[in-house]
Structures are given as structure tokens and as C-alpha cells.
Amino acid sequence: MQVFYTITELRAYLAAQRSEKKSIGLVPTMGALHQGHMSLIEASRQANDVTVCSIFVNPIQFTNQDDLSRYPRTLEQDYLLLEEAGCDFVFAPSADEMYNTAPSLVLDFGTLETVMEGAFRPGHFNGVGIVVARLFNIVHPDRVYFGQKDLQQLAVIRRLVEDLAFQIEVVPCPTVREADGLAMSSRNRRLSPEERAIAPHLYRALSEAQERLLNGERVADVIQVVQDYIATVPAFSLEYFEVVDARTMQPVDEVQSEGHTALCVAAHLGPVRLIDNVVF
Ligand code: AMP
């Protein structure tokens, strides 16, 4: 496995791979890697000759400076995990390398970002879109791997690829969970043991809501049930719970056709903001 810190060097190596007609898979991450990330690496390895993992804590997608400064950074451990997983190239640029000058371009994803993460973190998806577009132009991947854990982000990336005609296949990967249901996340490391013990309530609330909707209960009633359930765990502060169309991210008042209803939740637990979703 080779680690690159500069765009020029990575580009040179990847140009050589492309000239040998090798296909390239890209897995963009912010590091502090876990098995969720590794499942993306594995998916890329299976479909491509070469897998590139980027590790970059992208300052322009953070809407809270405290969250940015406390974001876990575990580069040396990340390299070990990636090496073990069979990743070929790691791209770990500094912020100066990634943004020689601060981008002036502003991306607006319209109604995709007027709800949930977009509404609670204004400017977040602009930052995501810009860094991902830059990574696409640096790596020129054939396929790119994103987790369904960040469902709205996945929708935004699909839109980016569509609108800017990137010749890249976007491959969604299922959410990897801990044994107790908690969705794996780099931010989970910041939970205290007490917070970690109650964190799985978020997934339990989603599962309960899914079951009720499948049993024909009304969306409005189920939303109330979830709000009441989260309220029974005082350490949680619920930011949103939405029942949406998984293609448009718009709230719905009844369950959509198969595979298109998503339940999305965000809540603060101690110092950490957790998000999760289920699609059914
Ligand atoms: P991050 O490092 O949190 O920006 O995540 C990098 C990529 O890994 C994104 O596409 C995430 O959706 C994905 N990811 C994060 N956590 C998980 C998980 N638990 N299961 C599957 N994919 C994940």
C-alpha cells in the first residue's frame, strides 16, 4: 500500500494505472476508520483493479468549529487497517494541499438539502459536494463507494454525478452496525461508556417505527411514538425524525412503494451528534 500526501504524486501514479487499463475504485473518508469503512474498501476491491481511499477531514463541510477540532484523527491506525484490508493507495492531503485557495464555487442541491442534514447544517452539502468533485477530478475513479449510513449525502452525490456528467458509477453500501444495532461511526469514539450503552436506542426507535409503519400505522402517529420514545431517554436530544421518500428526501405522509421509504433520525448524545436511518 502506498500513501500519498500530494495531488501531483497521486495523479502521476494513477495515470500509470490507467495506462495499463486498470479500473479504479475510490472510497472517500474522513478517517478514524472502522468496519463500516472497511466494507466500502472490500466492495471496491471486488469490483476494481485498484482501490484508492482518501482520508481528509474536510473543513468546509463542518458547520460547527468544535465538531471539526474534536473530530477523531487516527492516521497511523487507519493505515494499518487499510493495509490489512488490501487497499492499494491512500490519499491523505493536508487542508492546504486540498485547497490551495479557498473555493469560491457554491453548490446548491435544491430541495435535496432543504431538509434534515441540509436544514440543520446549512452549507454542509456544499462542502461535501466540493470536496467530492475535487476528489473525482484528482482520482478519476470508475466507481465510487458511499455508505447508506449517510443517506442524504448519497442522494446529493448521485445528483452531483448526474448534474456534472461525471462518468462514475456511484455504488451504495449498506450500513454496518455494532452487535447491539448502533450504526458504526467515527464519532462513536467520543461517547462515554454510559452514553455508548444508551446509544443503540436510536436504532431501536427506527426499528420500532419501521415495524409500526409496515403494520399500517399512520406516519404522523409513528412520528409521535418515536418522539415519545426518545424523550424517555433524557440524555438524548432529538434533532429530527423524518419519514421521507428515499429518492427525493422529501417528507411523506404515507409509506412509498417498495424500497423507497426511509426513516431518518439525528440526535445529540453528550458531545456527539448521531445520525442513522433505515430504508424499506
Ligand atoms: P466518513 O468517514 O464518516 O465521512 O464516512 C466515509 C464513508 O463511509 C461515507 O460514505 C459513509 O457513509 C461511510 N460509512 C460511515 N459509517 C458507515 C457504516 N457504519 N456503514 C457503512 N458505511 C459507513
Image (cartoon, rainbow, N blue to C red):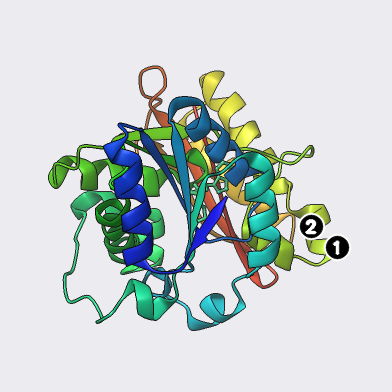
Left or right position of 260 against 203 = left
Q: Position of residue 186 (x, y in %)?
A: 63, 58
What residue is disc 2 on?
196
Look at the numbered discs 1 and 2 and tell me whether their residues touch, using CB distance below 8 Å.
yes
Left or right position of 52 against 199 = left
In the image, what residue type sits under mark 2? Arg
The secondary element bearing badge 2 is classed as helix
What residue is disc 1 on?
193
Q: Residues within 10 Å of mark 1 (few under 14, many from 20)?
A: few
Q: Position of residue 114 (x, y in %)?
A: 28, 57
Q: Position of residue 241 (x, y in %)?
A: 50, 49
Q: Is residue 17 above or below residue 212?
A: below
The image quarter containing residue 233 is: bottom right
The secondary element bearing badge 1 is classed as helix
Label of residue 145 in the image: none
Q: Residue at x 40, y 55 (%)?
A: 116
Q: Is residue 205 above or below residue 80?
A: above
Front residue (pair 116, 132): 132
The image quarter containing residue 155 is: top left
Q: Position of residue 226 (x, y in %)?
A: 60, 44
Residue 105 is at least partly visible in this image: yes
Q: Residue at x 35, y 41 (%)?
A: 17
